[in-house]
Image (cartoon, grey):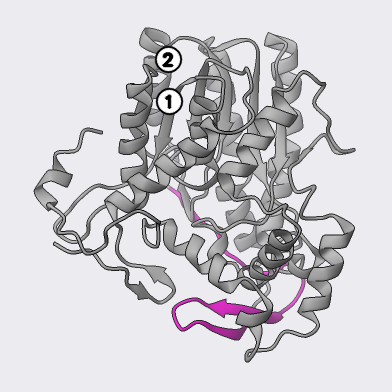
Amino acid sequence: MIIKEELIKGFVKNTHPYGCRQEVLNQINYCKNSKKFTGPKKVLIVGASSGFGLATRISLAFGGAKADTIGLSYETGVTDRRLGTPGWYNNIFFKEFAEKEGLIAKNFIDDAFSDEAKEKVIKYIKEQFGKIDLFVYSVAAPRRKDYKTGVVYNSKIKTTSGEFEGPTIDIEKDEMISKKVNSAALDEIEDTRKVMGGEDWKNWCDMLLEEKCFSKGALTISYSYIGSPRTYKIYREGTIGVAKKDLEKTAHEINEKLKEEIGGKAFISVNKALVTKASAYIPTFPLYAAVLYKVMKEKGIHENCIMQMQRMFSEKIYSNNEIKFDDSGRLRMDDFELREDVQREVDNIWSKITPQNFQKLSDYEGYKKEFMQINGFEVDGVDYDADIDIELLKKLEF
């Protein structure tokens, strides 16, 4: 079977397994050739199969720490209807490369929100893996089931303060369009907080503490985003922003408990605007990111997920210097994005951009390429005309 990229309603329908493999390898090679760091040896990453979670795992394994890792994610393999999700193959090929280096790379496929998944991971930690030095919570899910009550919460990308209409990109048609978003009802705000807030991160930490799975002084991190005022209405001041503020509030609660019980620390890393499976569908964000990419690339300070994570660990968290936090106790990895000169140039371009010139004035080409690479397409060094053996894919060891 020859696998070709296909966009339907803004989603990439297909996955190219060997494009995913090459992209994992590219990230590994970046880390091997970057500034190294001495860091944690035993790491748990919940939400490990793509975006920041995958980059975190790769950086910790190949960027200097040589960490053994456990990755939990909710992915599917080859079925009669599809070739499997990108994260499925990212997990498989990460494990392949990590084990060649003599590292443990245990993959769990399960719903991170369930107690059963937590219990499986904890059992493995206690019986085979050893105490955790770092726990990274990087879950980006559209819904969450409460397994105790059976209630399913669905997140909504809406504002919390009236209707919003702004420019965004239709990536399927390569067009700049205007999109309208309604204000959320109170139950929609609460549902989004339940899915994307800090409740499940805290549940994980409580269970890991109770079962004595943390090493002394262990850290736990979750990821957030603030961004430019250009995206505030739909992001920071929208339903997602409510959830992220809850995540940040929860970090302080977890931090107090970890500090008291194991001398550990919990905090949020506020990351840069990047193309991920989650961010690509937030109105206005794709156009803002495409403009930002152009400005930051011209200044030589653009970072993708792996570059961001490698810098975070080598220069911020596991450097020889004390970790610096902002007034709210957050690590700021969006420091380059929010530089005054960067935002000034973004604003200048934004004031001139139209549906006719947006591709020329922004780095839409680079933005879309990163979007396609999430599913293994447009990755340099991959033969996209090669015939893929589907039966062989089914036999790949997870």
Count residues near mark 2 (Cα–Cα under 10 Å), then give few for <14, some for 14-19, many for 20+. Answer: many
Residue 394 vs 212, above or below: the answer is below
Quadrant placement of the N terminus: bottom left
Residue in the picture at 59% in, 50% down: 304
Tell me if I can see residue 115 in this picture.
Answer: no
All told, the count of numbered labels is 2
Direction from residue 392 to residue 120 in the image, left or right: right
Position of 75 relative to 323 (above/below) = below
How far is mark 1 from mark 2, CA to CA?
9 Å
Q: Earlier in the sequence, mark 1 or mark 2?
A: 1
Q: Is residue 209 visible?
A: yes
Residue 176, magenta (yes or no)? yes
Give the residue number, with chain letter if any, for mark 2.
125
Residue 366 at x, y percent in the picture: 55, 66
Residue 210 position (above or below residue 362): above
Q: Check residue 70 in the rendering and tell me which mark sits there, or answer none.
A: 1
Secondary element under disc 2, as helix, strand or loop, is helix
Q: Quadrant of the C terminus?
A: top left
The answer to which quarter of the image holds residue 201 is: top right
How far across and down, in percent of the image, does residue 345 sit? 82, 69
Q: Are marks 1 and 2 in contact (CB under 8 Å)?
A: yes
Identify which residue, 375 or 134, lies in the foreground: 375
Q: Nearer the viewer, mark 1 or mark 2?
A: 1
Residue lying furthest bottom in this view? Answer: 356
Magenta extent: 151-180
Q: Magenta stretch: residue 110 in it?
A: no
Closer-to-camera residue (241/134): 134
Between residues 71 and 315, which one lies in front from this camera angle? Answer: 315
Q: Residue furthest left?
A: 391
User: Could you tell me the amino acid type at mark 1?
Assistant: Ile
